[in-house]
Image (cartoon, rainbow, N blue to C red):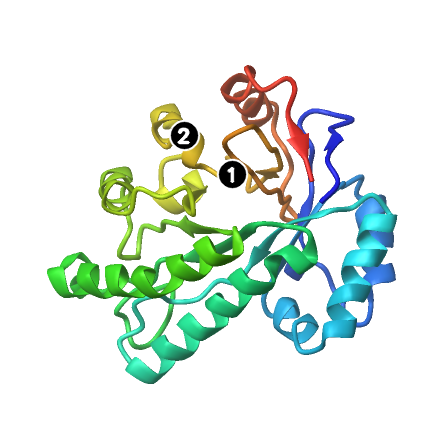
Amino acid sequence: MKEMRLRRWPLLGAMVHEFPVGPDEAQHLISLLRRFDLHAVQLGVPLLEEIMAGEERMATWRTKLEAAALPILALGGYRNLIAPEKTKREANIAFLQRCLEIAPQFGTTVVATETGTYNRESDWASSPENQGQEAWDTLCATLHELLPVAEQHGTILALEGHVNHVINTPERLARLLEHFPTPHLQVVLDPFNKGSFHNRSTWIFCGESVPICHSLSSMSLSIRSPRSFTSCSLRLGKSLTCKSDQLIKDLFSDKKDTLVV
């Protein structure tokens, strides 16, 4: 992969599922990104699934985006890792294994996902079982199936905690990272999901294990440092406030020579 120095700081990009584009509309997406002055892409579901359906389509998206200087910095393969229905959980694992395998074909190493819930009605609703030992063991068992694939293909599984999920606090996240001491397991940091809009310590706590950051106004930031790779997004309909912009700059002020791929 070709490395290039960032031309601006912070570098803003988009989660493409926020845009009205189909699997054969890469050029339309490029036009939209330029309209909003965005410079990178997090390619997520459901669009990602449609693009992954064909090798030629995958190659076309990467080629067109890279030609427009719009790198794909992460795949958003969000799935419930502890889905209580075994068949659904196995399908989710298989999909993420595939994402981890083919991520380099998109020019990235990062695959993001939530950790999930035992709720049987919604993948984003809470369940009292989420904080039990069974849910924890299920999550660990799932990671034991995913991380070897990440290690084999040199990719990163980035977990996004959520207040309604099995990983719902920085403490539980730290415990999980200690249990799996590998650079192939990292973190999507979204303070909104933790219900803690102004908790600076939550940002700093994960250190170099943060490949993707979503800021206070639903902004995401894309960076690459010698030990961490971050992805980027700016959700439409949300304005970047001076407060969150300054927080991002303060937190990453020591990464002036950041590179992206």
Query: Where is mark 1, residue-wise?
Result: 213
Q: In this view, does 30 lie to the left or right of 42?
A: right
Please provide percent x and percent y for residue 241.
Answer: 61, 29
Relative depth, front residue between 137 and 14:
137
Q: Is residue 23 visible to the viewer in this orientation of the structure?
A: no
Q: Is residue 71 visible to the viewer in this orientation of the structure?
A: yes
Contact flag, marks 2 and 1 (Cβ < 8 Å): yes
Q: Which residue is drawn at 62% across and 37% down?
A: 222
Q: Residue at x 44, y 61 (%)?
A: 149
Please provide percent x and percent y for residue 76.
Answer: 55, 58
Q: Quadrant of residue 238?
A: top right
Amino acid type, callout 1:
Cys
Neighbor class of circle 1 (other Cα within 10 Å; few <14, some 14-19, many 20+) is many
Amino acid type, callout 2:
Trp
Q: Residue furthest left?
A: 133
Task: Indicate which disc, 2 or 1, sits on the residue closer to the N terminus.
Answer: 2
Query: Where is mark 2, residue-wise?
Result: 203
Give me the disc on residue 96.
none
Q: Is residue 63 left or right of residue 232?
A: right
Q: Residue at x 35, y 75 (%)?
A: 89
Relative depth, front residue between 50 and 217:
50
Q: What element carries label 2?
A: helix
